[in-house]
Amino acid sequence: MKKNTKSNVANRQKVLIFGSRGMLAGDLIVSFKKDGFLVIGVDKDVCDITKEESVRLIINQTKPNLIINTAVLQNLDECDNNPVATMMVNAIGPSFIAKHSGKLGIPFVQLSTIYVFEGNKPSYYTEDDRPNPVNVYGITKLNAEYFTKLYNPKNYIIRTNFLFGKNYNPKITKTGNFVQRILLLARQNSELKVVTDQIISATYTKDLAETILKIVKTDKYGTYHVTNSGHTSLYDFTKKILELAKLKNQVNIKGVKLADFSQTAKRPQYTIARSVKLSSIGIKAPRSWQDALSAYLDEIG
């Protein structure tokens, strides 16, 4: 029995996840472990992805069968204020991972964003639409896509949007995701100002992680849009959060326009995603954002 156990462990598929203390990474670790993968999670205290030698060493030491990069700088205003640092983490780092995974023939999953689009299209963006980012964050993430395709033909580029999930690094996002911030503010204030004209495709990290697992098991490389189904405004998303949390009678929500906020980085107005490629490889799009939000609120209690 012991010999078989050791053999089984030795033969398990191994996945290396960069940015392992992030919100999505926590659910990726759970999903891949449940599927039998041996998961190796590393964060910047173990591997600084902006240092090529550091990336090369960790890949050579761990010898994974699959690599996923979730490391990112994503505060839009901070990205615009610090373009060099943002480019290093969001684009140059992924280029090193793609380069060295590509040399070894290791499939590579690079997380990207619907913010690679300008956000002027009041309908769905699909994988076939032409990117045109409007802020530093979007530009750097699009560069990461280009580097990934250039250096590693065995690539999966996963574009997603507006994540919420129970795992987050308080050093990066002190108040958690948008849902957590709204719940906190609703308990502290009698009125909330929320944008009515910014339209999103919200995404539950648990659903995203499970869909990524399904995608990589097909060996169908390429670019995929993965969000929960449907779309909503930030205003209506907030209303649904408070309704499900039974807080809607405790706070008044005041609608405001995106242009009313003074922000450094330009925000795409429409970040609505739809995948035309998931169904082509036999994978259903994740459940509706409403059902996902309800499940998430149950998860965090």
Image (cartoon, grey):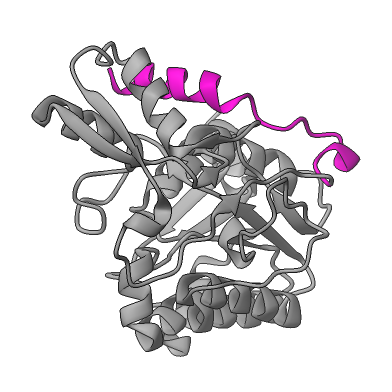
What residue is shown at x 46% (from left), y 36% (from top)? 30
Q: Residue at x 33, y 53 (%)?
A: 21
Q: Is residue 226 left or right of residue 208?
A: right
Q: Position of residue 203 (x, y in %)?
A: 53, 38
Q: Is residue 178 left or right of residue 11?
A: left
Residue appearing at x 66%, y 72% in the figure: 132
Residue 238 appears in view: yes
Q: Main secondary structure of the magenta part?
A: helix
Q: In the rendered image, is residue 47 in sight? A: no
Who is closer to the viewer here, 186 or 203? 186
Farthest residue toward the right? 280
The question of residue 205 being in magenta is answered with no
Q: Number of labelled discs?
A: 0
Looking at the image, residue 158 lies above or below residue 50: above
Q: Which residues are magenta?
A: 277-301
**Location of residue 182 (image quadrant):** top left
Q: 258 or 42, which is in the foreground?
A: 258
Horizontally, is 300 left or right of 131 in the view?
left
Residue 140 screen position, x and y as percent: 53, 77
Q: Quadrant of the C terminus?
A: top left
Q: Position of residue 292 (x, y in %)?
A: 51, 24
Image spot of residue 245 (x, y percent): 30, 15
Q: In this rendering, would 23 be left or right of 111?
A: left
- Displayed quadrant of residue 148: bottom right
Residue sitting at x 71%, y 38%: 214
Q: On the rendered image, what quadrant is the N terminus found in? A: top right
Q: Nearer the viewer, residue 66 or 295?
A: 295
In the rendered structure, does residue 285 fall within the stretch colored magenta?
Answer: yes
| Vertical comparison of 276 with 63: above or below | above
Q: Nearer the viewer, residue 110 or 66?
A: 110
Residue 56's place in the image compared with 181, above or below, is below
